[in-house]
Image: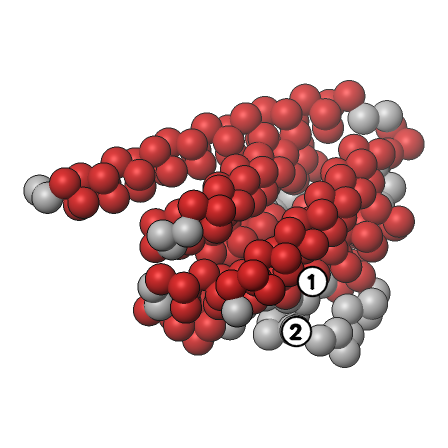
Amino acid sequence: MSERSASNWSRRTIVVAVSVALLLLGAAGGIALARTSSPSGAPTAVDIGFAQDMSVHHLQAVQMANLAEERSQDAAVRQLAFDISSGQLEQVGRMKGWLGMWGELEQAPAGQQMTWMAGEHAGMSGMSTSMPGMATSQELAKLRGLSGPEFDVFFLELMTRHHEGGISMARYGADNASVPVVRGLAASIAASQETEVRTLKEMLAARR
């Protein structure tokens, strides 16, 4: 095995190990928080739908971020990708923990994604599926085929749109969820991704 191959293998191994640890940590935290929620905080369709769909949304961001950690040669891009991946994996674990405590599916049944937003997402720009900001399979395939500066620019473009879509979901969850911990996480996601969007746009402008 060449030195480069060994380095890539080691990086992938670390990413997988960290991913598993973060998911387990988040799930444990989600279960603990769900157990301490008051009876008046029983989950509604918004709480359940938010946890299901934001988990799916987050996991695509993690998928793109992991590609950046493997393929980008730009230290700042790799660091941002690591921050996105680690933060969102922990949040996914938390949301899956809630869904498990509520006895709900981890993903909404086919055709029921985003129904919890009561049509708020209809007509939004950047939509490729029922979730705002998601990359298409063609865009993901293109991303996998790029390298160097071209990869970095396209990654930053996709992640900016992805975050903007996630912010709309998080704001709706923060305003309309019934369970306090769900509202709190949604508000936190909106705030952190608004900050990251500013960073993404600054990085993109510097690399175009």
Q: Position of residue 37 (x, y in %)?
A: 81, 26
- Residue at screen point 68% across, 22% down: 32
Going from N to C along the chain, the mark reached first, 2 or 1, is: 2
Cα separation, mark 2 vs mark 1, equals 8 Å
Apparent side of residue 16 relative to residue 190 in the rendered image (left or right) = left
**Kind of residue at badge 1:** Gly
Q: Is residue 29 above or below residue 46?
A: above
Q: Nearer the viewer, residue 27 or 60?
A: 60
Q: Can you see residue 73?
A: yes
**Kind of residue at badge 2:** Gly
Q: Is residue 165 above or below residue 31?
A: below
Q: Position of residue 65 (x, y in %)?
A: 47, 51
Q: At numbered mark 1, what does the secondary structure look like: helix, strand or loop?
A: helix
Apparent side of residue 37 relative to residue 3 in the rendered image (left or right) = right
Q: Nearer the viewer, residue 46 or 162?
A: 162
Quadrant in which residue 93 is drawn: top right
Q: Is residue 29 above or below residue 51?
A: above
Apparent side of residue 150 relative to residue 188 in the rendered image (left or right) = left
Number of residues whose C-alpha sits closer than 10 Å to that of mark 2, classed few (under 14), some (14–19) or many (20 or more): some
Do labels 2 and 1 touch, CB within 8 Å? yes
**Circle 2 sits on which residue?**
126
Q: Position of residue 46 (x, y in %)?
A: 80, 51
Looking at the image, the residue that sits furthest to the bottom is 123
Quadrant in which residue 186 is drawn: top right
Q: Which mark is residue 24?
A: none
Q: Can you see residue 110?
A: no
**Circle 1 sits on which residue?**
165
Q: Position of residue 200 (x, y in %)?
A: 61, 56
Q: At numbered mark 2, what does the secondary structure look like: helix, strand or loop?
A: loop
- Residue at screen point 52% across, 69% down: 208
